[in-house]
């Protein structure tokens, strides 16, 4: 149980386009979802936390107008990278918790590798 | 702020070898400490955790002891298997990190048959 999927697993796009990444909890209701970014050989950095039906809370330094997060249902959250540029190329990982704010009960997706040309 | 430092990989061992992956942390107070594992193509999974000093977390033959005096949480396994090949992340949740998980950079482990 407690499976989280991400789609797509890899995406390549041209600079200036927007890319949407989906995160789904397959067998539980995700009250809270988290989005992380991972640079090569570096740790996962939390980008934002979203509770179902509420606006996402972004970490300091993360542009909310660039990284749009929607958590409209208890099983789906989306991250849209708007007007992507090469510096946005990274590995994006989502996680989900059945608990509100559930920091230590997160189930992680397999990640999405974004390459912006 | 809170931080986690773990040994750089990749680490390559032969099957049945003894494994140690070092992890040290910086945090105020008494954070909770975690090891996560990421198998190829899968998401991170919680491997074990410890929430107070001298606690030992264990799972699947892996162990780690919360050492407050050395601010360490080293991961050990007495006899590794090929199926243990994965990336291992040390992490903490502390008071000053506002309930966020702070991850180390990950250590890739490869086990030779």
Image (spheres, helix red, strand yellow):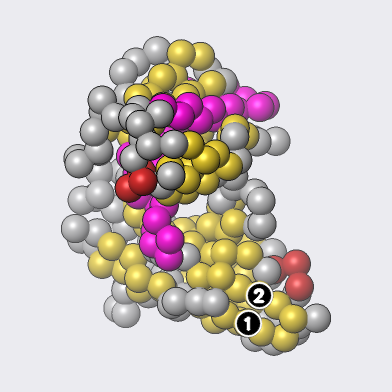
In this rendering, the answer to whether A98 lies above or below B7 is above
Residue B4: x percent and y percent?
A: 34, 65
Question: For the magenta stretch, what is the residue range?
Answer: A18-47
Q: Is residue A25 magenta?
A: yes
Q: Are marks 2 and 1 in contact (CB under 8 Å)?
A: yes
- Which residue corresponds to the image point at 59% horizontal and 56% vertical from the top-left? B38
In this rendering, the answer to whether B1 lies above or below A18 is below
Q: Looking at the rendering, in which quadrant would you find the N terminus of chain A?
A: top right
Residue B12: which disc?
Answer: 1
| First-in-chain label (2 vs 1) | 1
Label 2 crowding class (10 Å Cα cut-off): few <14, some 14-19, many 20+?
many
Residue situated in front as seen by the camera: B3 or B39: B39
Using residue A110 as the reference point, say whether residue B22 is left or right of it. left
Residue B7: x percent and y percent?
A: 43, 77
Most common SS among magenta residues: strand
Residue situated in front as seen by the camera: A57 or A8: A8
Using residue A5 as the reference point, say whether residue B21 is left or right of it. left
Residue situated in front as seen by the camera: A79 or B93: A79
Q: Is residue A65 visible?
A: yes
Quadrant of the rendered image containing residue B99: top left
Residue A37: which disc?
Answer: none
Residue B110: which disc?
Answer: 2
Dot 2: chain letter: B
Residue B56: x percent and y percent?
A: 51, 68
Mark 1 falls on what kind of element?
Answer: strand
Q: Looking at the rendering, in which quadrant would you find the C terminus of chain A?
A: top left
How far apart in space, not on screen, are marks 2 and 1 (Cα)?
Answer: 5 Å
Label 1 crowding class (10 Å Cα cut-off): few <14, some 14-19, many 20+?
few
Q: Is residue A50 visible?
A: no
Mark 2 falls on what kind of element?
Answer: strand
Quadrant of the rendered image containing residue A71: top left
């Amino acid at each position: 149980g407690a499976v989280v999927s991400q789609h797509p697993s890899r995406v390549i796009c041209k600079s200036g386009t927007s890319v949407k990444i989906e995160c789904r909890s397959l067998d539980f209701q995700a009250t809270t979802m988290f989005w992380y970014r991972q640079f090569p050989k570096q740790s996962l950095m939390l980008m934002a936390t979203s509770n179902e039906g509420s606006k996402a809370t972004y970490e300091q330094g993360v542009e909310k107008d660039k990284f749009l997060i929607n958590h409209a249902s208890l099983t789906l959250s989306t991250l849209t990278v708007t007007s992507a540029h090469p510096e946005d190329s990274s590995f994006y990982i989502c996680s989900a918790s059945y608990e509100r704010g559930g920091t230590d009960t997160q189930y992680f997706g397999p990640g999405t590798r974004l390459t912006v040309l | 702020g809170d931080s986690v430092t773990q040994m750089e990989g990749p680490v390559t061992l032969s099957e049945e070898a003894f494994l140690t992956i070092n992890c040290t942390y910086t945090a105020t107070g008494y954070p909770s400490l975690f090891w996560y594992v990421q198998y190829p193509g899968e998401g991170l999974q919680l491997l074990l955790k410890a929430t107070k000093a001298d606690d030992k977390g264990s799972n699947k033959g892996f162990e780690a002891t919360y050492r407050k005096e050395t601010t360490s949480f080293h991961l050990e396994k007495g006899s590794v298997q090929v199926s243990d090949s994965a990336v291992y992340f040390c992490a903490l949740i502390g008071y000053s990190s506002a309930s966020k998980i702070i991850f180390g950079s990950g250590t890739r482990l490869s086990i030779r048959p």
